[in-house]
Image: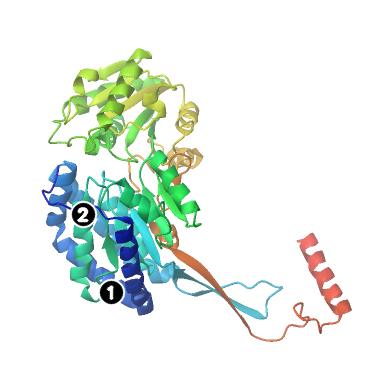
Amino acid sequence: MTTGTNHPAHTVEDVRAAVARARSAGRRWAALGARERRAALLRWKRALAARAYEFAQVIASETGKPVHDARAEVLLTLVHLDWAARNARRVLGRRRVPSGLLSVHQRATLAYRPLGVIGVIGPWNYPLYTPMGSIGYALAAGNAVVFKPSELTPGVGALLARSLGEALPDHADLLQAVTGPGSTGAALAGAEGPSGVDKVAFTGSPGTARKVAAACAATLTPLLAECGGKDAVLVAADADLDAAADAIVWGAMGNAGQTCAGVERVYAVESVHEALCSRIVSRARALTPGEAYGPLTLSSQLDVVERHVKQALVDGATARLGGPDALRAPVLGPVVLSGVPEDSPAVTEETFGPVVVVNPVRDMDEAVERADASAYSLGAAVFTRDRAAGVALAERLGSGAVSVNSVLGFAAIPSLPFGGAGESGYGRIHGEEGLRAFAAPHSVTVRRFAPAVDLTSFATPREKVARAVELGRRLHARF
């Protein structure tokens, strides 16, 4: 799981120098205007598409995931970059907004301006798709970016920065990659003093996010944090169980379970629980580890997976498929558990391995209650033949994104924002909210004519001001 290429461990000074180069390039980039940035980003997108297999090979080499998975990751990246480039002007460009009766003499407009330089700290599980949810949208919003990839996937970050420089030689410093251990990311966040970035977008564990947040707090640098999930699937009595089982196995076992919005918990109504378990086990047993999915990229994660499975069994769970014996590095066998107590770590903590818990519930009310009891609130899914009921359930769930009759349906839809709350972090990437996350609102008013009563002048008689204020008060008291 290595490219065989050495990448430097960038120091605090290196990080600050990268930010300075990015800032200089960012000024020129912001001055281009939205139309020119759109054209440039689409050129880069086409260059990435032409090199898709090259990127996929590097991703597969560094993470261990199958090449077909890596190619799908590249495609998702292209979809999001395309949307961000094509929609930034519409979302962020200056537009007129209502002035209201009190300020009818003013014309009010709103636009969103670039923040400057965005520091992006990326993960290893989806080393291209996930950070590009920040990088692509930040660039489309007119910013420059300094990207710190995971120390496990430095080659992806280096190749990404190099590809932009080659596709857009006039903006070669717009995307800087800094590589190294966690200390390099800490330096970008400002743990060793201000790095100069104007915002940080982080993806990783809640524990690391807290450290990044503390570093950002010292300089009041805003932070967008995506910190994982413990996503639940709710299966109603009328659900298509074959479709549900197929989606659950893919959502739980894909990428060896190393997906922040992957399926880790399933709550099925009692009347269909056994039938669903049977279908899940059948599909999971048919998988060939090493072909269907790769190894754990982070070898130490095996300790977490083993602890969760073993403790679940001690707590009274049943292993429907696999168990501790299936957890042999580097490629783990799939594990399906049922009857896991809700306070067991396999239910309460992020497992990040090819393990899924399938528990019975009385009804969908209990399913919603259990799904929302988690400290994480990133994604969820609902399976039912009644689409209206599925949407109603989705609206009740506290998760940031919900799919009905699919899992991760939102991941390939770039117009939908993505993010959660609680241990899943805060802020949103993707969609209009994702563009605005990397821009600052800028309000402008233009006085069109003199108002009948100028409330912002000492020259207006007090009696006239008082009558106008009283009239306004009466209107608001009545309507």
Residue 131: % across, % down: 31, 53
Quadrant including the N terminus: top left
**Residue occupying the point 71% across, 86% down:** 450
Which residue is identified by label 1? Answer: 39
Quadrant housing residue 104: bottom right
Circle 1: is it few (<14), some (14-19), or many (20+) Cα within 10 Å?
A: few
Q: Relative to 47, is 459 above or below?
A: below
| Residue 419 in sight from this viewpoint | no
**Of marks 2 and 1, which one's residue comes earlier in the chain?**
2
**Residue occupying the point 22% across, 33% down:** 299
| Residue 14 in sight from this viewpoint | yes
What kind of element bears circle 2?
loop
Does residue 113 appear left or right of residue 103 in this picture? left
What kind of element bears circle 1?
helix
Q: Looking at this view, is 285 or 375 the one in front?
A: 375
Does residue 455 appear left or right of residue 229 in this picture? right
Residue 254: % across, % down: 23, 37
Residue 347: % across, % down: 39, 26
Three-letter amino acid code of the residue under disc 1 = Ala
**Residue occupying the point 44% across, 59% down:** 437
Q: Relative to 289, is 307 above or below?
A: above
Q: Relative to 166, is 272 above or below?
A: above
Which residue is identified by label 2? Answer: 8
Circle 2: is it few (<14), some (14-19), or many (20+) Cα within 10 Å?
A: few
Residue 238: % across, % down: 38, 29
Does residue 109 appear left or right of residue 343 in this picture? right
Q: Looking at this view, is 244 or 221 the one in front?
A: 221
